[in-house]
Image (cartoon, grey):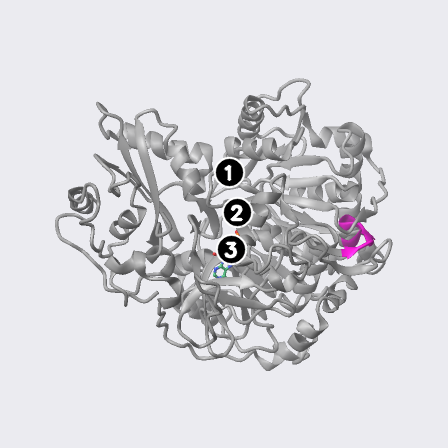
Amino acid sequence: MAGKTPAKEHTEVSEAQIAVHWKEEEYLRPPKKFVEQANMKDRDVRERFGPKNFPDCFKEYADMLTWFEPYHTVLDTGNPPFWKWFVGGKINASYNCVDRHLAQYRNKAALVFVGEPEDESPVALTYQELHVQVNEMAALLRDFCGLKAGDRVTLHLPMTLELPITMLACARLGVIHSQVFGGFSGQACATRIQDSGSHMLISMDAYWRAGKLIDHKANADVAVETAQEMGQHVDKVLVWQRYPGKYSSPTPMVKGRDFFVNEVLKKHRGARVDPVPMDAEAPLFLMYTSGSTGKPKGCQHRTGGYLAYVAGTSKYIQDIHPTDTYWCMADIGWITGHSYIVYGPLAIAATSVVFEGVPTHPDAGRPWRIAERLGVNIFHTSPTAIRALRKAGAEEPRKYKYRFKHMTTVGEPIEPEAWRWYYHEVGKGEAVIVDTWWQTENGGFLCSTVPAIDPMKPGSAGPGVPGIYPIIYDENGEEVPAGSGRAGNICIRNPWPGIMQTIWGESERFVAQYYTRYCKNRKSKDWRDWPYLAGDGALLAADGYFRILGRIDDVINVAGHRLGTKELESACLTVPEVAEAAVVPVVDEVKGRMPEIYVSLKPGHEGTPDVVDRIIKANEDIIGRFARPKHVYVVHDMPKTRSGKIMRRVLASISNRRDVGDVTTLANPTVVEEIREMVQGKEKVVTTEAVPEDIDKYGQNE
Ligand code: WTA
């Protein structure tokens, strides 16, 4: 929100009263050349996918796939909010992403791998070769590992071709894969192994990151040992080799438990495995994400609806054609990579680029050299990468002769400033941009412009994509109308094929987290009574464009990665000296938000550099290196209410140089000034800039 409301009134101000004053941005129109070639040019597409034609409109997406047996019911709402899509249909995701393209595209590149070291040539995998490798891996998983449909297997793989190959091999058998982002620590991987009940872990010996060959096998050992302590036994660890035939990790293999995939694969050379016809509703994969409570949620995605949704949106919103070279610079370990590097693009026979490295390494020209060399014409990345590339080399794109016709931004709100650099410098003013808003839970895009139809507006995601009917509700469940200038909670009124089925093993939590708040009637079987609560604050302009403001819960979006503050706080509490911990988001120029940690220590302990280092290490070990806080402050007491609750909102104000407001009602008001001085120095620095809504409201629900 804009800094209109004095901070002291925060607790009394309802979201409905919060006014947001953004400057309205100018529209930009898609270039004519783009419009002419676009997959979706029908200006009535939103009507075609409108409430009158719901849910049958989504047949259009299902028809983009090849079904072994046709579905008889598009949407079954019999047990809300556990919607079922394309009921009765039998389908296989691996078949749809690989086999069915062989007739026409056998020798076209399906995936192009670009390793981080620049002297290693890109590796193109044709659809034929992908077919061979997926089949051999599926044979290994079935015959050597004994995996069958419905089993879960945890993958902790970096950004190499082995990751999509493994995912597609699992999908071929109906085995549910649960890929854990490679940057997560071994311990974080263990929680996900335990929660999903995986008996197998698939990992890799090493991978490149910012010039270092990281020992990834060490994480597998920690993961298996920690899972064992948590009661989950892993009997096999499959280890891919970054350089086949050579072991690149100093961590020893465990006899009888660890196996090199490359070696075992030799026994399956030439194997062909029939794709298993799966129920449309059979789970395809789990993807864990942070929530407001400590434990990550295993978002369970279905086969038929998910694949239909990502195929449809890849075609209409990403506008991918089989002749394009498409590069999504996300990590496959996050939902963006699952949906828009692997499943969506491959379902529509794209050529999709897989990049191992860090965009700014060895310099900020790297992405543009890759784009030039591969002839990339569709580019997809996050605001964090855009900000980082701009900061490190605003002029770099001009040095290279690539040409993008389409670009995507995803994962965080993008400032109009950064958007404009993306448009003018990266896109050279020739590329259309889609700002796609969605979440791990959603499978695919929720809000975005349809690139050839809707004009772009910097900083706004746009309207709901075809078939998605978003709405903003205030605290009391009243609709916040378009153009009111007020922010509220963005919800989706209808079910859609990409929505997750449930939280793995926690159906009640699923209902409580996403549906209870605005459900109009718990007994109703009418989907209209079950709006989905996304957990973001948003604003709807008079033109129907949504501007996403950020999380409304205790989740910090760090460089597009969701971190639960409770997860970070409990990591801090594993350091024996720490008595209390509070984590707040702080605005960061490149990463959008970063966590800042406040701790108080048990009596008799000092805030030495050693304690601070161990707190940082605890977060890196338990969660991952991307959870590294911006600062750790050791305070002698936390600001608390009289009932003893830590006032995180006060700490968030201090961290972000905002006015802390009235603190006289606290149990220990004097500590606030002490902490302020420690963080900001003697001089009082309060910025007068508008307060971002997520920071402003942080901790308000306490
Ligand atoms: C945020 C990533 C503004 C939002 C696909 C959401 C965005 C969270 C945008 C989901 C966007 C994602 N503009 N904010 N275009 N896209 N977000 O689950 O807060 O990793 O709730 O999914 O990222 O993050 P997740």
Q: Nearer the viewer, mark 1 or mark 2?
A: 1
Residue 191 appears at what percent x and percent y?
Answer: 55, 33
Residue type at mark 3: give it.
Answer: Arg
Q: Earlier in the sequence, mark 2 or mark 3?
A: 2
**Residue that carries the numbered disc 3 in the rendered image:** 517
Tag 3: Cα neighbours inside 10 Å, few (<14), some, or many (≥20)?
A: some
Left or right of residue 111, residue 506 in this image: left
Would you place residue 172 above or below residue 436 in this image?
A: above
Whole-percent x and y of residue 688? 23, 64
- Amino acid on which disc 1 is placed: Lys
The residue closer to the viewer here, 176 or 698, is 698
Examine the rendering and report whether any part of residue 411 can be seen: no
Indicate yes or no: mark 3 CB to ligand 1 under 8 Å: no
Instruction: Tell me if 276 is positioned left or right of 254 in this view.
Output: right
Magenta extent: 86-96
Instruction: Say whether residue 257 is magenta.
Output: no
Q: Nearer the viewer, mark 2 or mark 3?
A: 3
The relative height of residue 624 versus residue 259 in the rendered view (above or below) is below
Q: Is residue 214 something that shows in the picture?
A: yes
Residue 227 location, quadrant: top right
User: Relative to 444, is 2 above or below?
Assistant: below
- Residue where numbered disc 1 is placed: 295
Q: Per the image, is 90 magenta?
A: yes
- Give yes or no for contact between labels 2 and 3 (Cβ–Cβ under 8 Å): no
| Residue placed under numbered mark 2 in the picture | 357
Q: Residue furthest top?
A: 255
Q: Secondary structure at mark 1?
A: loop
Identify the element where label 2 is drawn: loop
Which percent across, then down, holds residue 655?
27, 49
Q: Along the horizontal axis of the image, is 321 left or right of 690?
A: right
1 and 2 marks in contact (CB < 8 Å): no
In the rendered image, which quarter contains the N terminus?
A: bottom left
